Image: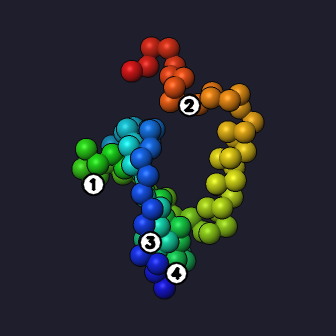
Amino acid sequence: MCTYQTHKIQVDGSGKAKTGWISLSEATVYVDHPVHLPQDHSVNIDFLDPAQGPSARVAVELTEEAALALADAIHQAIASAPPGMASARTRAAGAA
């Protein structure tokens, strides 16, 4: 059963797509049938740069357990770094 619930957020990042590195400005998360993962349903995350068209996409299909573990690992990595270290407010010197 598909939920048809899609959660879309704005992101500020980069991802490696088929054509190389692209800027990412949007992410969608949903539970649906995977294209590649050999499972009936998966947690799907699409990172996109809509300004570059549909090919500017990095797609991820995860099991529920892997998605939850990833969310936990993200929280742990951020908590173990100095506050604000990876924030958009602290861009590297010389970055645009």
For marks 2 and 1 on the same chain, the one whose residue lies earlier in the sequence: 1
Q: Taking 62 as reference, is 80 left or right?
A: right
Q: Which residue is mark 4?
A: 40
Question: How far apart are the alpha carbons under marks 4 and 1?
Answer: 25 Å
Earlier-in-chain disc, 4 versus 1: 4
Q: Are marks 2 and 3 in contact (CB under 8 Å)?
A: no
Sequence-wise, which precedes: disc 4 or disc 3?
3
Residue at the extreme bottom of the image, as rendered? 1
Q: Alpha-carbon distance for marks 4 and 2?
A: 37 Å
Q: Amino acid at mark 3?
A: Gln
Do the residues under discs 4 and 2 have CB atoms within 8 angstroms?
no
Residue drawn at x 24%, y 50% as measured from the top left: 53
Q: Nearer the viewer, mark 4 or mark 3?
A: 3
Q: Quadrant of the C terminus?
A: top left
Task: Mark 4 and mark 1 in contact? Answer it, CB < 8 Å.
Answer: no
Kindly state the secondary structure of the residue where label 2 is placed.
loop
Q: Position of residue 31 (x, y in %)?
A: 49, 71
Image height check: is 82 above or below 61? above
Residue, disc 1: 54
Helix, strand or loop at mark 3: loop
Mark before the other along the chain sequence, 3 or 1: 3
Q: Answer yes or no: is residue 33 visible.
A: no
Mark linked to residue 87: 2
The answer to whether residue 22 of the structure is visible from this angle is: yes
User: What element does badge 1 sit on?
Assistant: loop
Spot occupied by residue 46 in the image (x, y as percentages of width and height): 42, 57
User: Callout 2 environment at 10 Å: few (<14), some (14 to 19), or many (20+)?
Assistant: few
The answer to which of marks 4 and 2 sits earlier in the sequence is 4
Question: Looking at the picture, how far across and down is residue 57, in whole percent?
Answer: 36, 51
From the image, tell me which residue sits under label 3.
5
